[in-house]
Structures are given as C-alpha cells and as structure tokens.
Image: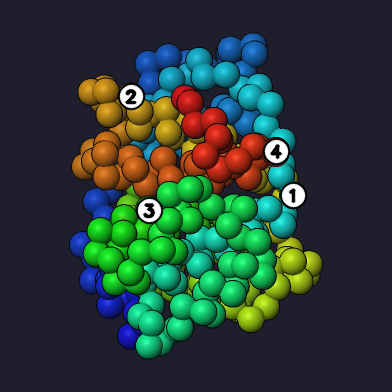
Amino acid sequence: MGIFKKLFGSKDNEVPKKETQDKSTSKSYDDIAWMTDLRRRNLDICFNAGYKPTISLPTDLGRQLRPAIEIANRLHAIKALVLWLMVPEESLPKEHILSFVENNNLQNFMTQDEKAILDVPRDDEQARNAIGWKFENAWPLAWYFGYKEPELTGEMMSGDLMQDILSNYTCKLDQSVTDWVKDKITVSENDLMKKEDLFYCLHNAVRSAQLGSDTVPTGFDPMGNGGVIHERRHSLTYMVSKDTSWEDTDLST
C-alpha cells in the first residue's frame, strides 16, 4: 500500500456517492444575446449537476494561455512540497528534494508560505494536515499533461490518486522538468478554456452557497466541498492567466 493511501485513504473505502439532485433555474439563458455557446453549455452542466451559478456572469475575461513549462513547473513545485511532508526522510532524503527544487528553479513557482514549508520538519502535523489542498491544485495541472479530468463533485481526492499523479504524470527527481515537458501532449487550449469557464461558474455557485444561498447540490458542504472547487478552479485559472503569479491569480466570481 502506498504512503499516500495509508495517510489519506483510498476511494475503495469511501461511502458511495448520493445521486446528485437535479435542479433547474427559473431563468432562461438561451435567448440572452451576449452569452456565448460555451457559457450556455457550461451552465447546462452546472444546473444538471445541481449547481446554480449566476447566469449574468461575464464571459469576456481576457484569459490567455501561459507557457506549458510554467504549468509544469507549478505542478512540480507542488510535487516537491507534497514529498517533503508525506514521505519520511528514511525513504527519501531531503537532499534529493532540495536538489530537485534548486536544479529546476521551482522556488520561482512557490508562494512565500510554500517556500517556508521546506524549512519545517518533515513530520510536522499542522503542515501535513494542510497539504491536502495542494492535492486539489495538482489535479487540474496534471490533467493538462494527460491525467483524467478533474471532477466537479467537490469530493476531495484520495491519497492513491495523488500518488498516481506523482508517480506517472510528473518527472523523476533526477530529471529536468524542461526535458520532461518537451514530448508531452497537452490538453488543447480550447478544452482548457472550456474547463476553466466551467469551474468559474461552479465557483460562483459555491461562493453564493457560502453566503447562505441554495446554489449547490444536496449534501454538498459549501466550505469543505466548496474548498475543493476553489482549489481546482485556482489551478485552471492560473493556467489561462499568462504573466500572472499563482498568488495574484484573479479568483473573483
């Protein structure tokens, strides 16, 4: 059993998902002249899944794809942080992780708080409990390089899924991220823009639910499940926010 499965569990032991309540909106958006076909399709997905985002959300947000190497570097920065906290020193000496970070300039793709993680003890429980949110950031980034599509249920990903990403959708610690990304087939820009717009709409429904509105599926926790949507949306919007740092990515809804 992998270290991540031991610590975070496997989907094999999870309670089966409840059927999503089918909710619809009383407002029609089919005849809104300014609305794009992309937005109409994404609103359909949202409402069919039980989410009710505001239909007046803007559609022209100036999104622009950032270079693949920057997306790869962000993914591998997360890999280094997760390995630091989730794999014990005796299994992976710290020098291997720190050399990987330095050789690939991955600190340029970490926030100040994330850089500080590399200074805490590797068994720090507080930091370890918080690192699960980085799993959610990693999923859309890995999807760009061939991993399966990020789910929109708000269910947190399990340790075995994260281990799959780190083992099979990132480069090894003795490799160069620049070399790794060269032969990777990525998601098309069009598909990435579609997915980002979908999570933008989902995030709006989540934010409304956090303020007390009935805008999410039955059984959906606006804070817990909503945090998952938030973190996955962060990565998607980052990927289409060229020349913008991770911490300055616009997550307004």
- Where in the figure is residue 16, as x and y percent of width and height? 24, 61
Helix or strand or loop: what does disc 3 sit on? Answer: helix
The picture places residue 161, in percent across and down from the top left corner, at 42, 69
| Residue 34 point in image, percent of width and height | 64, 13
Q: Is residue 164 above or below residue 51?
A: below
Mark 1 surroundings within 10 Å by alpha-carbon count, few (fewer than 14), some (14 through 19), many (20 or more): few
The residue labelled by disc 4 is: 243
Its colouring scheme is rainbow
Q: What's the residue type where badge 1 is placed?
A: Pro
Of mark 3 and mark 1, the one earlier in the sequence is 1
Q: CA distance from mark 1 to mark 2?
A: 33 Å
Residue labelled with disc 3: 133
Q: Alpha-carbon neighbours of circle 4 within 10 Å: few (<14), some, or many (≥20)?
A: some
Q: Residue furthest right?
A: 182
Residue 114 appears in the rendering? yes
Look at 67% across and 78% down and name the residue there.
175
